[in-house]
Structures are given as C-alpha cells and as structure tokens.
Image (cartoon, rainbow, N blue to C red):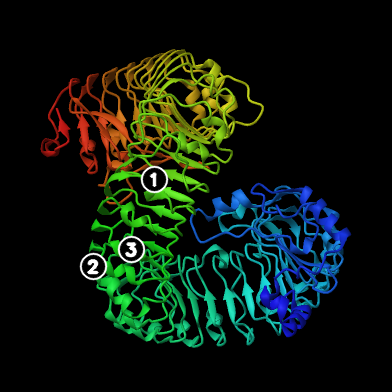
Amino acid sequence: MGLCKNTILFILICSLTSSLNPLCKCKASDQVLCIPSERQALLNFKQHLHDPSNRLATWSDDNTNCCNWTSVSCNHETGHILELHLSTSITYSYVGYEVAEISRFGGEIHPSILQLKELSYLDLSSNYFGGMQFPSFLCSMKSLTYLNLSYVGFSGSIPHQIGNLSGLLHLDLGGDNYFTGKIPHQIGNLSNLLYLDLSGGDQYDMDWISLYEENLQWISSLSSLQYLQLSFVNLSNAFDWLPVLQSLPSLTELHLQGCALHHNFHPAIAINFSSLTILDLSSSFDFGSPSTPKWIFQLKNLVSLKLSNKNLQGFIPNGIHNLSLIEDLDLSENLFNSSIPDWLYSLNHLKSLDLSFNNLHGTISHAIGNLTSMVTLALSANQLEGPFPNSLSNLCNLRSVYLSNNNFDQQVSGLVEIISNCASHTLEVLSIGGSKVYGNLTAQIGIFKNLYGLSISGSSIQGAIPISLGNLTSLKYLDVSGNKFDGNPFDVLQSLSELEDLDISDNLFCGIVNEHHLVNFTKLNSFIASENRLTLKVGPNWKPYFQKLIFLDMALWHLGPHFPSWIRSLKYLKVLSIPNTNISDSIPTWLWGAFPYASSFDFSNNDIHGELSYTLKNPINVSTIDLSSNRLSGPLPHISPIMEYLDLSNNWFSGSIASFSCQEKEEPVWLDYLNLASNNLSGEIPDCWKMWSNNLMIIKFDNNHFSGKLPTSMGSLRWLYSLQLRNNTLSGNFPVCFKNSTKLVFLDLRENQFSGIIPPWVGDILLNLKIFLLRSNQFNGKIPSQICSLNSLHILDLAQNNLMGQIPRCLNHLSVMLVKNTTLKSHIDGKGNSSIRSVTDVLLEVKGREDVYAWPGLVTSIDLSVNELSGEIPSEITSLKGLHFLNLSNNLLSGKIPQILETWNGWRQ
C-alpha cells in the first residue's frame, strides 16, 4: 500500500494497468474521497447481499470514504470506483469449503451496481446466489475488462447481450453454475477477448450439465483469444472441435476437462497448435477412452499437460518423452499398471509430477535425483515399494511431497533424513500416511521450518511426538491419526498457533489437557482427537479459544459428568461428536438453538437421560443425530424435515410411534436412515409411510414390542434396502407390500409371529436380496424353488419354522456361495440407490450361539434347522464351495450324508 501512496512511477503504472496488475489492488490514499453517488450505490448493493460473517462491516454510513472500504479499489485521482474484489477464498484444507460456506455472500446481485460508471474489475466468484439467473444488466457495463462469476450457483441461460462487453479481457462463468440451452453465438462478437471461461459444473455432477453446442464455429471469431475454459460443457456433438480450436493463432491455454470429446479425426488433419503451452483434457474423451490421442505428443511447446481421470490403461505412454519442455505433468486417477518408466526421469524441466491414484508398482528409481527442478511430487495411492532412494536428497526445490498409501515399508526417520538433506528450507507439505512407514518420529522433523502441511496418518509410528515438532510454527494442517503415538500430545502441540486442522485420532495418547494447552489454538477449524484416553479439565466458565471451530470430535475423552457447557460458545460448529465421554446428564435446552450451521450431533454411548419430546418439537436444522445407547425416555421426539440420519436405538423410549411417523410435514422428508431398535416402543406400525417414500433406505425396529400386521404403505418406500424387525410380536402372512420393495438387500423378520407360506414371488421380485432372515416364526409349506433365483444371497436363515418337503436341489444356483470370497470388500451396500449406506453388522445364530458379524460381506450361511424337512440332502449342495456355515439339523431328513459334507468345518448335522 505504501508503494501506491508514495511512488509516483508506480502510481502511473497502476493507472494504466490497474485491472491486470495485482500489486495495484491497494486502496486509494486517505486524501482521495469516493463519489457520493457511487458510495450510495455500494450501500444499496450491500443491502441486497446476505453477508453472514459481516465481511462488509466497513461499508457503512459512518465511514464516508468508500475508497477505504474493504474489497474496494478507486481511481487515485478521480475517486471513481474501479474494482470490487468480493470473491470468497477457499483455503487448502478438507474443511475449506465448510469455512467458505460460513463466509460466502448470498442474496441478490442488485442493479445499483450500474451506478459505478468506471468499474472495470468485478469478482463475485465462489459465493452462492442459488436460483438466481445471470443478471443481464451486467451486460450493459461496457467499462468491464474483468468479470468473474464462477461458482455462484446461477441457473438459466447465458444472455446473448454478453456480446456487448467488447472490452472484456477476462470472462469466467465456470464452476457450479447450471446454465441451460446453447452457448449464444453472439459471444463470438467479443473479438477482443483474451480470456474466455464458460465451464460447467463439477465433474461429479454431470447430470446437471446441460449446456450443449453442436459445433464451435463461433469460437473462430475470437481471434485474440489466449485462454479458453470450457470444462464440463458437453461437447460430444462438436465433431469439429480440434480443427476449430487450431484456428486460434494466439491460443496458449486450453481447458476442456470433462467435455466428452470426440477424438477420432481423419489422419489427414494437420496438428498445428504451435502457440499452445497449457492443455487440460482431464475426464474428457468419451468419458474415458483407454489410450492417449497421439496428436498430443506433437505439441512440442507444451509446459503443462493434464490427463487425469481418463481411465488410461497399461503403460505410461512414451510419447510424452517428446514433450521436452514439460514442467507440469498430471496423469493421476488413471489405470496405469506398470512401473514408472526410466525415460520420465530425463524430463529435467519437470516442476510438478502427479502420478497418484494409479496401479503403479516397483520401486522409485535412483534416477529421480535427475529431476532437480521438481517442486511438487505426487505418487500417492499406488503400489510402489521401498526403500526410498537416497537421490531424493538431490531435489532441493521440493515444496510438496505426496507419497501416502503405498507399500514403502521403511522407517519414517529414514525418509525424513533423506528429504531434509537438501529440502529442509523449502518443504511445505509432506504426506506419507498409509505407506507402511514405521518406527519413531525423530527430532529431525523439526528441521522443516516452512512446513505447513504434515500427514503421517494410518501408519505404525510409535512413541511420543518429538519436542522438536513444536518448532514447526508454520503448521496449519497436522494429521497423525491411526498410529501408535503415546503420551500427552498437547505438551508439544500447544505452541502451534497457526494450526487450522488438527487430527490426532486413533492413537494411544493419554493424560490431562488443561486450558493452557489450548490457549494458542485460535485458528482451529477442525479438531479431531477421538479414540484416545484424554481428560479435559477446565474451569466452569472456560470459553474455548478456537471460536471459529467447525468440526469437533472428542469421542472417548473424559468430559463428564456434566454436559460440557463450554461448547455453547462455538457458534460456527457444524459437526459435534462427543460419544462415549462419560456424560451423565440431560441435554440442555440451549443446545438446539445454539448452532445455526449445525449438521451433525453424535452424543451416543453416554448416560444421557430425560425426555426429548418437548425440547425437539421444533428442532434445529440438524441433518444427522445419533443419541443411541443412552437412557433417554418418554415418547419419540418430533423431527425436522431436513433430517437425514436419526439413531435413537438402545434407549428407553416408549409408547406408539404414530405421532412420530404420521405427523404431516409441510416440506418433503429427507430421512434415509431410521434406527429405533432396542427401545420399549409398542402398538402397531402405523400405515402412513407414503410421506417417507422419497429417501428412506434403512429402517431398524428390532427388539421392541410392535404387534399386528405390517402396513401396506411400507411398500411405497421405493428406496428401501434394509428392513430389520427382529424380536417383536408382528403377525400375519408374509407381507405382500414387499412386492414393491425391489431394492431390498437386507430383510430380517426373525422372532415374530408371521405365518403362512413363503410366497414364490420372493424369488422373482426380491432379486437384490443378500441377507434373508425368517428364523423363529410360524411359516409353513415348502421352501419355494424360486428362492434359488436369489443369486446375490449371502445369508439365508429359515430355521425354527414349520417348513416341510424337500430341500430344493437348485441351491447350487446361489452363485455368491459357489466360490470363496477373495475380494477385499467386506461390507454390503444397497443397489441402485442415489445415496449408499452400508450394512455394518449382522447378528447370526451359528451352532447354537449368537455372534455379531461386523463384516457381513465376508460371511455366507444357510440355516434350515428345526423344521420338518424330509428326503435326502441334495448332492448339489456340495457345489457351494464358498459356504461358511450350513445347518440342517433337527429335521426329518433321510438317506446318506454326501461324503464331502462330512469334512466341512461348517457342517452341522
């Protein structure tokens, strides 16, 4: 700012290039006053904005000089407003978007901005004006040279009047804007454009992208274009995209991420992209073709090439070797399954190399020491092995190293020593979690004075955190979770005043944490410290220093016996997790109104008591609540329509659930997980499930006192994939409502009073069933042969009924049981749901005892015991090589036992 006030030459430069020179984003001097009409225009503009964190506090009647206001830059001579910098920055952090959500602007972009006659720079990016269409009045602001409206949530069409902004040098409409219709051809009138960004939404929301263009001929009019951004615009019908783009003589930067491009061109097409230096084709060709287009290897001037997330297979293409000037190479998130080729280590201009999330194997060659220009090295999530080559110490410019989730199997001290030999003063990020590193973290870690990100999670590192780590005063992000660290970590961490995200969960930490341990944590956004044995001892009036905290997880700490009142001051909390923390108290009434941004509460496995029926009649907007395994009593509470996950299991709730489930909602209900198991609930299950039909996927009502028949409206739950009703007194025939439950994966009707036959349509309709449990009911008749069509079945339990007849010979059609499970997948998902939740555990009775299987995907079982089945044991059952448990005991079976069954460990006669 001093330069702008005191250096005449710099003022002259700023007056000529203020829209492009970042050093000129300083405020006007105190002697320059803004234009009164423009000051009033800004006040009107602010009045229509939603500013949740009061970022525009300086925009007030009391502050007469708007040139001194936050985010405003003026002409130093005339006082006219030139620039508005109203973007919301998103920091490097996994909670960065949560932080931004609290501070981003919303509301309305108001036409009062038209009064700023000389405004040349307008940046409103990364805010949220959801539902608002592109404000067409901006198209009359011909003074604009820079307009950035990316990530603001616009919808509708891009107005053709945007072609009036003939002075634009930079236009950015990308990010999560959901524009519909075609790109207006009038945009081709912007012949002076140097920068064009019309990118669509996020790559994971491709269904939202509806901006289509049959051809790109209009782009050829933009002869001055240097930068083109069309990411996530569906260009699958633009067969001429490559020839058209080659007609832009000045194009240096091209971003076509996720465009579904056609890439089969006539071989006679000459490739002449001599000006192109930056190319991003990530997630592009036909949503994933297996090979890299060869024309890319002819772009000899490329310095940056991004081909991530394209399903490229086999070897890393050696054509990249021709790109001798390449500095930034991103081949991440593909299916390469080779070793790292030797020629790659000869690309000595490389500054950034990203090969993460592939299937690369082998060791890192000693030749990596040739890449002395390397700044960022990303090799995470592969199958690379150790040891780390000592030549890594040649990379003296390293700032970021990502080696997590590999198989290096080396002492952590060895890697730290190698990197510290040369990069101790440059390294800023070190991520080596989950790479099978082990041993003790030595004092040498304290050498990296500029380190702001350190992740060594999910490894086997042990011992105390070295005192020298406390010298890393630049640290913002620290993750040591999932190791075997011990001692009191806060004796060391208390000096790290810049920390924003801290994760020390799942270690062997123990000890007492006092107020002085936490006094410097004023910048924390995320505090995850669960699964340790720590005790918090603070005064009754203690107010935490981390007032901007968003995530708080202190599971397994000792916080009780009283509900911690200090939490009340944390106004920005979104996630509050304090399960198993020795709280023996009622939930204070202030809790439900204290956190306007709250989305998740977990107070499970405590000794919380009292009734919720009154305190939650008008609950806050919390989408996830887990109050399981407490002593809560009385009737069930009312819930908010926005709730998605509710677990009240293992409490003392009693009475009917009619008022809970049948209360009319003015808004659609979003609940997809409902667990009321192990309470004292009684009466019939009411017939009012139609209002829940949009999302409900998992229902757990087991271990209650429900009676009567299942209501027919339960068949309207079109996303239902898990229903658990074990140990009630429900009755009637097998429920016909399940004819509509085609997505059912887990059905548990055990220990009730259901009767009648098992209907044959079960095998024709419930084809996704993986767990089918009917034990201890009164079903009779034959086992229908159609049950053999359930070829996804893992567990079948029909024991302790009145079934008769022969065992179906077709059981060898149960294909999951034919072979042993050799995959790593151990959970069971719903199929075809918009949101997937896993079946996490199943209680099974095996060989006379009950066991909980936490990973049901690894278990296969057939139990037909205690019935009246007759005839021989079908020999076909011996084909089930992947079957773990088979129980046919206490029936009327006759004949010989198939010989192979006599040797099975899972066999029970």
Instruction: Tell whether label 3 touches label 1 (CB within 8 Å).
Output: no
Q: Is residue 322 above or below residue 91?
A: below
Give coordinates of residue 211: x percent, y percent.
Answer: 70, 59
Residue at 55% in and 44% down: 572
Q: Is residue 404 visible?
A: no
What whole-number distance in Å separates the C-alpha atoms at marks 1 and 3?
21 Å
Residue where numbered disc 1 is placed: 515
Q: Which mark is residue 281?
A: none
Q: Which is more toward the observer, 688 or 32?
A: 32
- Residue occupied by mark 3: 469
- Name the residue beneath numbered marker 2: 410
In-front residue for pair 44/262: 44
> Which class describes the residues within 10 Å of circle 1: few (<14), some (14-19), or many (20+)?
some
Q: In the rendered structure, are the residues bearing label 2 and label 3 in contact, judged by CB atoms less than 8 Å apart?
A: no
- Closer to the chain start, of discs 2 and 1, is 2
The amino acid marked with disc number 3 is Leu
Which residue is painted at 55% across and 54% down in the image?
Answer: 97
Q: Residue at x 88, y 59 (%)?
A: 37
Quadrant of the image containing the N terminus: bottom right
Between disc 1 and disc 3, the foreground one is 1
